[in-house]
Image: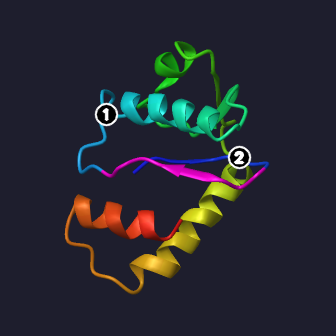
Amino acid sequence: MLVLLNAKTRQVIMSPSTLHPDEQWVVTPAESFVHQARGRGLPATIVQRDRDTKSFDAALRSRRVKAKVNEYRSPNTNAYVERFIQTLGQACFNHFVVFGTEHLDVLTNSTR
């Protein structure tokens, strides 16, 4: 699952989950994020991302969005999204047994 959070408004856009998040998979959520963010009237000009090797920078560039990679050993740069993931785990995953990606998608979409 890919979680994108607008730091100013705290609005969250989550991708459908997958068991195999490869380089090809991250392109679709990146394109969907830009479309959804602009549809909500949110400025989508810069995306700050972690240092994962599965980069969706090219997909963002094609939509005129700059990807900024977090600095090395800077855990506070992901603080907002890390807190959201912690809350998601406490509110959802501590109360349900997840039976696959479709079930996970249903559970996470009902918490937003």
On the image, the x and y values in percent for residue 49 come to 59, 37
Q: Residue at x 34, y 60 (%)?
A: 105
Between the C-alphas of marks 2 and 1, the distance is: 26 Å
Which of marks 1 and 2 precedes in the sequence? Answer: 1
Name the residue at the right extreme. Answer: 8
Q: Residue at x 69, y 36 (%)?
A: 71
Task: Write down the residue under mark 1.
Answer: 25
On the image, the x and y values in percent for residue 52 come to 48, 37
Task: Write down the residue under mark 2.
Answer: 74
Q: Count neighbours of disc 2 (C-alpha within 10 A) and say few if under 14, some if 14 to 19, many if 20 or more.
A: few
Is 15 located above or below residue 41 in the figure? below
Looking at the rendering, the stretch of residues picked out in magenta corresponds to: 9-17
- Counting every numbered tag in the picture gives 2
Using residue 100 as the reference point, say whether residue 55 is left or right of it: right
Q: Count neighbours of disc 1 (C-alpha within 10 A) and say few if under 14, some if 14 to 19, many if 20 or more.
A: few
On the image, the x and y values in percent for residue 40 come to 64, 41
Residue 44 located within the stretch drawn in magenta: no
Residue 10 located within the stretch drawn in magenta: yes
Give amino acid for label 1.
Trp
